[in-house]
Image (tube, grey):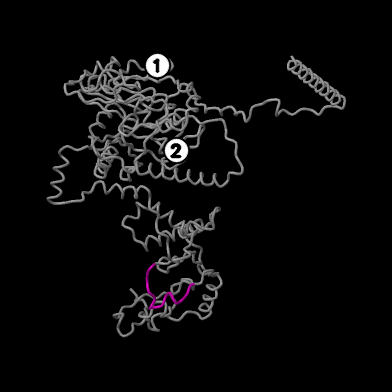
Amino acid sequence: MPMYQGYPAEDGAMGGLEYPSMDMGYPQEYQPHAYQAADFGPGLAMGPGLYPPMDSAYQEAVPDLLAQYSLYPEDDQEFEEGTQHGPYLRDDPALGPSEPPFMSFSRDMPEPEPRELAVQNAKAYLLQTSASCNLSLYEHLVNLLTKVLNERPEDPLSILESLNRTTQWEWFHPKLDTLRDDPELQPTYEMAEKQKALFLRSSAGGEGEQEMEEEVGETPVPNIMEAAFYFEQAGVGLSTDESFRIYLALKQLVEQQPIHTCRFWGKILGLSRSYLVAEVEFREGEEEGEEEELEEILEGEALEAHEEEGEEDEEKEVDTVPKPQWKPPPTVPKEESRTGANKYLYFVCTEPGRAWTRLPHVTPAQIVQARRIKKFFTGHLDAPVTSFPPFPGNEANYLRAQIARISAATHISPLGFYQFGEEEGDEEEEGGAGRDSFEENPDFEGIPVLELVDSMANWVHHMQHILPQGRCTWVNPLQKTEEEEELGEEEEKADEAMEEVEQEVGPPLLTPLSEDAEVMHMSPWTTRLSCSLCPQYSVAVVRSNLWPGAYAYASGKKFENLYIGWGHKYSPENFNPALPAPIQQEYPSGPEIMEMSDPTVEEEQALKAAQEQALAAAEEEEEDEEEEEDEDLED
């Protein structure tokens, strides 16, 4: 077998092995050529004798072809030894250029293989620019991979969609500044920070144990979770989480105010925010100092303004302004604290954890006007109430008036749970309201659930009825006090006929629900069992049809009232605002002020002749009277 002639080994590195000759009929372009040392890096310099040198003509043609067809020249500095790697850039050499590198073209180059051609076609397809933006899918994928390699998230696959959106946004919104705005505080996070204080205890150690022992004892904070459980059986109420947060908020209110009794009244919905309402009663001796101070300040300002007006009137006595004959109707005084519609105090807040705001006492004028309008609450207590007839106050006053109306109409209890005290007599008072207070009956044993559902006579109202006047106890607004009686007796005589006003009388306290008036042939109340499959373990549920959203339950010796609604009364007809009042007469109409047409000359002459005749007749009568008097004197 003949030996093949190979290339000579240098320095014995080839170990004396002989390799077959390559001149065996292959084409010239496939013959071995010599490579430069720079092609192998600085540490891989090859000896000159390893490969024979290539043709000089071919050696010079390659750079020209590369310069001609390479549209994306690369910087040689990126391939130096001292180049620092990372963070990766969009056109990082480690990731490859963002544009496809074109291969050197030569006449003698063979046709590309099918696999390589498919790769080139696919890359050309990815480089197509989108019709909606000046960006190709290839560039977007390069930017996406660059972002992933720079940030290196823990689980990039799970946040791939978010990274995709962020990368595309950053491409079209380049950073013009290194400073970024502070992220906006989300309302949910802000509310969570405020509610976090409800779950923290201020004290720890022995003080905390002592405080816990005090809380276990008697406390004015109601058992919200128990009431929420029973209302849940009835299919109404709030969620368990919200009920517990409300309990913590009421606990915070009891710690801040001198409260004797406290209960969760309900929730009134609003357009932007809703109101959580707490019904409280202060301890004996704790008067409402803030409101009294506010009233004193308002009265002082009114007196000062009246005195200033009096001084100005004394200075300007030259021009007397005529006084109008119309007199405004007398103002009905509001009820005192702890009586009537102002028996309880009400605090509201928009969310558990926010500050509680105390509502002012309600006035009869506000209740009367609240009956004539219908407005949605906005959730802002200082918002104006724009309506006709105009409402005397803002949203806080309107909210307080609606709370008084709902409480008077929907707060009910089982028959016998409350009873009148022995000190009060059976006779009605002068105002017609009769008894205005009651106490719990210690001998109450409860009413069976089926009886509570079957008959409305087993439920009674334990809140006083509000009269059309706007008060629970009627007063005569035309009756004057001793100071007013001293001003003048003439005005009293003129108003004697007006003082005869018919007295308003409403239903007494603890009136059964069976005596309530129907609404368009519909019962004002609806009763049912919480579960008809097991009535022995159910609770009795009562729903008000007059005020949608008002509910009550009773089970054994326990009962509770709750309202969750928009604060609107049921209306069988569509609500229509009141029409404006007729325009008042400015002045009495008579011939003295009526305009007349000018008389003609003939009419003036006739009038003058008639006046002369009347004057002559008067003179004759005077002369006759004088003659008669003279004759009488002579006689």
Q: Which residue is at a point 47% across and 74% down the rendered structure image?
A: 75
Q: Which residue is at a point 34% across and 61% down the rendered structure image?
A: 152
**How far across and how far down the image is residue 81, in percent?**
38, 78
| Residue 398 vertical position relative to residue 635 in the rendered view, above or below | below
Q: Relative to the observer, which residue lies in front, 119 or 229?
A: 229
- Residue 603 is left or right of residue 409, and the answer is right
Q: Which residue is tagged 2?
A: 393
| Residue 577 vertical position relative to residue 451 in the rendered view, above or below | below
Let me know if residue 247 appears in the view.
Answer: yes
What span is in magenta?
74-87
Look at the image and say whether residue 79 sits in the magenta stretch. Answer: yes
Q: Which residue is at a point 33% across and 39% down the rendered structure image?
A: 347
Q: Earlier in the sequence, mark 2 or mark 1?
A: 2
User: Which residue type does callout 2 highlight?
Assistant: Gly
Q: Which residue is at a point 43% across and 78% down the rendered structure image?
A: 35
Q: Element at badge 2?
A: loop
Q: Relative to the observer, which residue lies in front, 470 or 60?
A: 470
Q: Relative to the observer, which residue lies in front, 196 or 423?
A: 423
Q: Which residue is tagged 1?
A: 518
User: Which residue type does callout 1 highlight?
Assistant: Glu
Q: Which corner quadrant of the image does residue 341 belong to?
A: top left
